[in-house]
Image (cartoon, coloured by chain):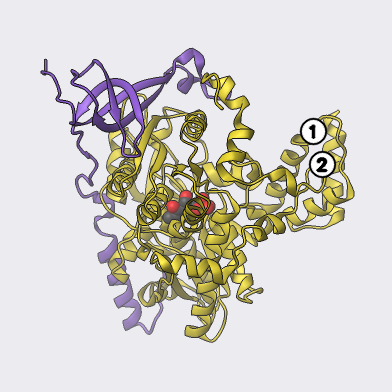
Chain colours: A yellow, B purple
Amino acid sequence: MSGATGYAAVMARRAAIMRASVGIDYDRYRTGALAFDYERLLADTGYGIESARAVQAATGVGATPLLELHHLTALVRAVAAPGKGARLFLKDEARNPSGSFKDRRASLSVHEAKRRGYPGVAAATSGNYGAAVASQAAKLGLPCIVVQEAFDSRGIAQPEIAEKTRACEAYGAEVIRLSVGPELFYVFLRVLEETGFFNASLYTPYSIVGIETLGYELALQALDACGRFPDVVIATHAGGGNVTGTARGLRGAGATETEIVAASVDLAGLHMASDRDFNRKSFTTGHTGFSMPFTTWPDRADVPRNAARPLRYLDRFVTVTQGEVFYATELLAQLEGLERGPAGNTSLAAALAIARELDRDRVVVVQETEYTGAGKHPIAQLNLAQSLGIEVRRGDPRENRPGERIVIPERPGQIAARAVDLDRVRRSYLRHALESLPEGAVLEAADYAFLVEETRSSRAYVEEIVHGLQGTRG
Amino acid sequence: MTGTVAAGSWVEIGAVVLAPGERAPQVPEDTRAVPLELRAKGVLAAPARIGERAEIRTAAGRRLAGTLVAVNPAYGHGFGAPVPALADVGREARALLKRAADAGGREDDP
Ligand SMILES: Cc1ncc(COP(=O)(O)O)c(C=O)c1O
């Protein structure tokens, strides 16, 4: 089955390794030169929201509470214009078995791996998802391997990832820790090829359908608590699965008018594959280093077709600073008695700014939290940052500079949700789409229809941009 | 330095996966200048010394070989000292809420 194990040889076998390890023939879904049938790919999982909920309930995943943040609402109102300051709610996903919404994401994959007789599961992830897969695998009695990017060339581990290593090992998983670099994917392919394990990728349709239950639950919980669906749902945004699954679940519950906002920590200027920058990010997820490339081109993932397609669902995309997220994390602990992990609070920071601009009767939902603890904590991140020479101080968050200076706001009114221009993101997506077009292929009618859906735009919009790009290509 | 580590000990091994010259073309320069390194933990298959070649059986049952780097490796991550820049955030916010409550719900945030 296998062959040479060198980098180029293994990468050349990636398509076959992927097909065997996720058990999906993605070619079946092709409908044009670029287009594929996204809805059918998801439907063919065989799961809907109700059946996904049943699988999740069997391992204690989901059904987390939606908590009203009375004190943070009062804080926002204290600094808002008269009559402004929406009601803030938060879905406490940290109460899932491994401490984050990633349990929803892992549950269907591990369930499928078991059902189809795979000898184990593997995942390439440095984050909460590894712990989630390991926890689900423990419950279902499958061996598990997690491959992480964990330390820099000086051997300094990112503290949050060190905690994920420990958590995965606590659930009985084998953890392969790597130094910095995208060749993690090569190591992961070798693991899949050697073991024949199921690839519990973050980006399979199982993963996304598993998250739909989150949006579904919160829609109904808000309806119950407030007599209305949420006006705004804010999701911490990285690879795009969180916002995609949540938005689909909201629609599934009938909340078609809810505004979907993605929020990322702004890490502009730091390079994601840089050994030097690795420990200067102070965040391991929920940041622009993932969300920009994945929103503008989802199919860079470890599966041929990414089931997380955020541009189809985003109404708004905003960024917040590192310091604003640490500040929001502190406020959540001190005013609401909820000590939760920093990355998951990215959407909370954005919510504190967005709620300020909305009328008081509006309902804003922060759609998840994550657990916190050793390494996975603002104090651990800020101490590491200072040890690397990064300045940490109070001040105006506009002075925050990723990798150089982390500025903790002085007042809640300083927190801002800075808009990312979605038109630019759509253009970038279309440029990537054209670049992925095989040599000599031309766009068919199905491709135009697909690109309109992908960008939530119109035929005229897509044609104008595509023709402009094609004009400049030759 | 240290003596022989007994078979059956919980250990960590290290290996170079890709030498600097073998790194992927898209990797930035600083990363390309260093090797891609791997660390894995497991049960030592046969007695070995730190720095020597060793084989382990991992938690998932795989056999992996590399250089023995640690015996019963510690989890060293923690919190560290409290960070002064966060120290006053809670107190300030509670004071702001109190002032706002006294003033009927709103406080002018300069
Ligand atoms: C706690 C938490 N929130 C949000 C995200 C972002 O999710 P996604 O990568 O699907 O956008 C992650 C995952 O990276 C996470 O662990």
Name the residue that disc number 1 marks: A438
Image coordinates for residue A124, horizontal then vertical, percent: 47, 40
What residue is at 28 percent from the left and 28 percent from the top?
Answer: B56
Q: Which mark is residue A33?
A: 2
- Inspect this view and state whether residue B110 appears: no
Q: Amino acid at mark 1?
A: Pro
A377 vs A77, nearest the viewer = A377
- Inspect this view and state whether residue B103 appears: yes
Image coordinates for residue A301, horizontal then vertical, percent: 59, 41
Q: Quadrant of the N terminus of chain A?
A: top right
Q: Secondary structure at mark 2?
A: loop
Chain letter for the residue marked with disc 1 in the picture: A
10 Å crowding of disc 1: few (<14), some (14-19), many (20+) = few
Q: Is mark 2 within 8 Å of ligand 1?
A: no
Left or right: residue A417 versus residue A447 is left
Q: Secondary structure at mark 1?
A: loop
What residue is at 45 percent from the left and 56 percent from the top?
Answer: A102
10 Å crowding of disc 2: few (<14), some (14-19), many (20+) = some
Q: Which mark is residue A112?
A: none
Depicted A101 relative to depicted A86: above or below: above
Q: Amino acid at mark 2?
A: Ala
Chain letter for the residue marked with disc 2 in the picture: A
Q: Are marks 1 and 2 in contact (CB under 8 Å)?
A: yes
